[in-house]
Image: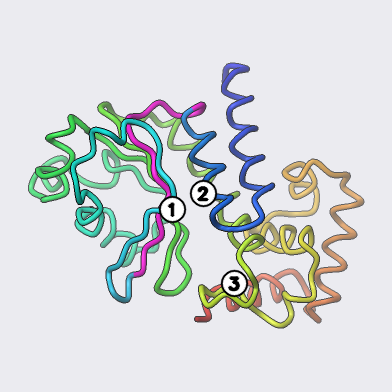
Amino acid sequence: MPSASYRALHDVLLALHEARDRRELSTGLICTLPGLFKGQFYSVDELDFSNSSHELLADAGETDKMPDGWQVFIGTNPIIPLIQTHGLEGFCLSRDISSLALVRTDFFNLLYRPLGLRDQLGVLIRCGDRAVGLAINRDRPFQEDERDLMDLIGAHLKVALGRCLPLSNAEGFEGEAMARLTTREREVLGWIAAGKRDREIAIILGIAAGTARKHVENVLKKMAAENRTAAAAMYHEAKGKK
């Protein structure tokens, strides 16, 4: 990866981990993603699957070319049924949807075709009936290395959402046990739930291995969790509550 790409990735991850709330997270992503991914249109959205509603949190790129009322087409994106059925997080239209199926959709014919768009790369983190996701749209297919980068960002996005959303929020990241954790400990818990070991957490967070190990010990103690598996299960259960 070129040094410029490393710097751009650093900027994206820094924006995620410094965000204090959902809006700040969305703005940070929109400001940094264009430096890492080339595209025509970028968006951070919130979806509610229970009533098919959609809220645009932030966008960037060639927004002036988007047709009036384009948001209504979000619900017709053929990737959404795959997310609901198979629990996908990272997605890429050109990889996950056949070209024949795509060209038969209103999403393609009423939005993508008029704008000259061909592919969409993104990640959507679901919690119960709601989800927060980011998407990049452009006029050429995304490559494997770009898809790998998005998967990495998705892992950090999941942890950032768990940290920056209020624990009392009805979107599902609440939990009495989690409320006892510091911001850093909630971040560590997110990586425990993602299956990372102490040394990996240390590298991800840029801290010493001993410091990471101490954070893990504090998390298990405060959550009264017998082991990492139990703590991860409590984390996922808290995320799944409404």
Place of residue 191 in the rendered image (x, y in percent of width and height, measured from the top left)? 68, 57
Place of residue 20 in the rendered image (x, y in percent of width and height, measured from the top left)? 66, 55
Q: CA distance from mark 1 to mark 3?
A: 19 Å
Counting residues from the start of the chain, the first of labels 2 and 1 encountered is: 2
Q: CA distance from mark 2 to mark 1?
A: 6 Å
Counting residues from the start of the chain, the first of labels 1 and 3 encountered is: 1
Q: Which mark is residue 26?
A: 2
Task: Tell me which amino acid carries mark 2.
Answer: Ser
Please state the total of marks drawn on the protein image: 3
The one nearer the camera, 116 or 94, is 116
Proximity of marks 2 and 1: CB atoms separated by less than 8 Å: yes
Disc 2 vs disc 3: which is toward the camera?
2
Specify the quadrant of the image occupied by residue 167: bottom right
Q: Secondary structure at mark 2?
A: helix
Task: Tell me which amino acid carries mark 1.
Answer: Leu
Quadrant location of the N terminus? Answer: top right
Proximity of marks 1 and 3: CB atoms separated by less than 8 Å: no
Q: Is residue 37 magenta?
A: yes
Q: Is residue 217 magenta?
A: no
The one nearer the camera, 195 or 212, is 212
Q: Secondary structure at mark 3?
A: loop
Q: Which mark is residue 57?
A: 1
Q: CA distance from mark 2 to mark 3?
A: 17 Å
Task: Locate residue 119 relative to residue 231 in the image: left or right.
Answer: left
Q: Which residues are magenta?
A: 35-48
- Colouring rule applied to residues: rainbow
Task: Locate residue 200 relative to residue 124 in the image: left or right.
Answer: right
Task: Locate residue 219 relative to residue 123 in the image: left or right.
Answer: right
Which residue is tagged 3?
Answer: 173
Q: How many other residues sit within 10 Å of disc 1, few (<14), some (14-19) or many (≥20)? A: some
Q: Residue at x 39, y 63 (%)?
A: 87
